[in-house]
Amino acid sequence: MRMIDVAREAGVSAMTVSNVINGRTGVSAETRLRVLATIADLGYQVNHAARHLRAGRTGAVGLIVPDLDGPYYAQLATRLARDLHERGLHLVLEQTNASPERELEAISFGRLRMYDGLIMSLLRLDAADLDQVSFETPVVFIGERPVPPAFDHIMMDNVGGARLATRHLLKSGARRIAVIGGRHDDGTEDMPSLRTRGYRQAHAELGVEIDPRLVVEVESFTTPSGFRALTWLQESGVPFDAVFAFTDAAAMGVLRALADAGLQVPQDVQVMGFDNGTETEFLVPRLSSVEPGNGAMAERIVELLDRRMAAGGNGGAEVPPQVTTMVNARLVLRETTR
Amino acid sequence: MRMIDVAREAGVSAMTVSNVINGRTGVSAETRLRVLATIADLGYQVNHAARHLRAGRTGAVGLIVPDLDGPYYAQLATRLARDLHERGLHLVLEQTNASPERELEAISFGRLRMYDGLIMSLLRLDAADLDQVSFETPVVFIGERPVPPAFDHIMMDNVGGARLATRHLLKSGARRIAVIGGRHDDGTEDMPSLRTRGYRQAHAELGVEIDPRLVVEVESFTTPSGFRALTWLQESGVPFDAVFAFTDAAAMGVLRALADAGLQVPQDVQVMGFDNGTETEFLVPRLSSVEPGNGAMAERIVELLDRRMAAGGNGGAEVPPQVTTMVNARLVLRETTR
DNA sequence: GTGAAAGCGCTAACAC
DNA sequence: GTGTTAGCGCTTTCAC
């Protein structure tokens, strides 16, 4: 069934039906009611493809993330899907597995056209890569990599959160804090480097030296990876009295490895995670973690996107200025810290 | 840039470009190469909306699930996304929050048209509800609810898996197995009822009576819900020597509650989960679980969909017969059982 | 093996 | 306030 069928049945033109459906002004109340009744009667549904082709809107927002099986992005996706649904938009998910090729592919011109807006977690691509791409679609980047000034960017306070966590561990007596996912060279602008900087700052502020052997680099921030990292540290014989894992998922692997080693948490070793995922308060023992403001982040993302999408509809005349938002972090202390 | 621009540049018609792009026969090798070179040269990308409008294909497959923040569907989605990507298809996610309205909405005519295929986890809707919907889009249902014979359906062996798990607990000495998510009335065809039947079968086979107070109904199968259920059971004073939770997520809450109660697992109480998610082997203690064949399930889903989508392309003349697949379950024993 | 014409269903622009 | 016209970019059909 087409719009024209509804129009004929209601005794109006297709244009009027279109106007009613899209809530545009310039339709008398009487006509509107009649058209709505006819639509309900016939069970008419608009054809998205035709609308998309003609008007350029798709009703879909893309979310490009490295993975979905870990808790972090799955929880973010859940929040975003709910917030977007309220605005009549769909969330479409794409996984990059943190591969630069897949990230670049996701923002290719053809793919972007599929969406009214894009939310992209940038892990590998640089500002230079992004410059090559012509964005007509509104994009909000999340993550810490530097982004060209033309785009909205939202990030968590990685340095501040890590600094807070490390300070707490130091103040509660830890002197040898292993850091899972840390970087020996924290010069780049990515999550591990930024959190490592926070870790170093806290040590500097409290005048504690860092044994470089406590900084354990990992290839990924999953639970198996955290498990392997701690097992390796343990076997290498480097002493430590606390562990700061850069994700809750990795911390979960750390807890498992400590239990295998027969170490008591937090008596022998304190443990701190990052993300404050829903699972943290049910681990044994309950995981202390850095809460990076995920709820606020999801809300802000949708807000930014919405603003830019609305502007795009107005012919792009008034493009809102690009914004970088930093969401504040705070500590949630549970049973793995003293 | 449009197809016609490529055509002009290559000195052919738009139709020939279309034929090349879609790999159709009837284009000379020479022309094909020239067109491909021009496409690469100009960086042309097809417009999905136009193709969709004209040809009806969208390149997207919808996955309708109750939630994404729990590990089960997130892991399934990850697997499906990967398998579909290999076939050049996108995975679009929709969450229903297990609401019948949202489930019905998801399979409405207009929404279905957005996809080349649909994978739907059915929790609440009945065969009667589904009969009302006219599916031109290929649909694969997952889950245990009865499905009209016109559709492909894939399910795990809930009864068999639960029976296996319960038998193991009984054989290792448990006599009072609490079941988190069980149903007093297991007459309906849904996951909790089917798993409860397996639990009852195993008891009947081994001649063990069931204390109905051990069957704890829950409103959801999340970790907090499992935690609350076990805390409640504990406080109600009903003795038990094992817990069978119907999801790993719920089992995680159970483990937490047992730790709070100072009970040793598996010495005082054995615990068994269901799903065998990636997190199980890192819990403290490592969770024994029923492996429902998730990998095979994802593969089979894509296979079924693919088959039906290919047939749809052939004008629907040869519609493949509808198939119901049951994936076998097996036990993975770790540290929470004896 | 290749091309021309028609039209998928909708909406922007403008006429009335 | 409502209708008419045109066309978004592709693919189906059929002619050559």
Image (tube, coloured by chain):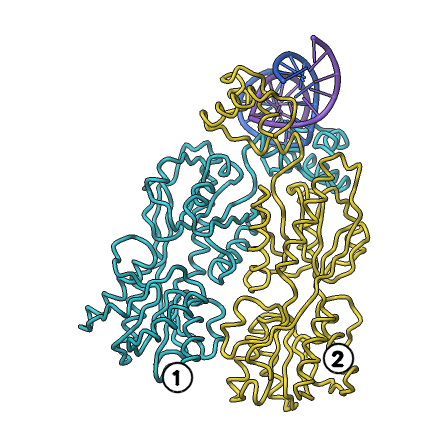
Chain colours: A cyan, B yellow, C blue, D purple
Identify whether B135 is placed above or below B209.
above
Looking at numbered disc 2 in the image, what kind of residue is underneath it? Ala
The percent position of residue B71, horizontal first and vertical second, equals 55, 64
Left or right for A57, reference A267: right
Residue A260 or B247: which is nearer the viewer? A260
Q: Quadrant of residue A333?
A: bottom left
The percent position of residue A33, horizontal first and vertical second, equals 70, 39
In the picture, which quadrant includes the C terminus of chain A? bottom left
User: Residues under labels 2 and 1: Cα distance?
Assistant: 39 Å
Residue at position x 40%, y 78% from top? A258
Looking at numbered disc 1 in the image, what kind of residue is underneath it? Gln
SS at mark 2 in the image: helix
Identify whether B184 is placed above or below A313.
below
SS at mark 1 in the image: loop
**Residue beneath disc 2:** B202
Left or right for A206, reference A260: left
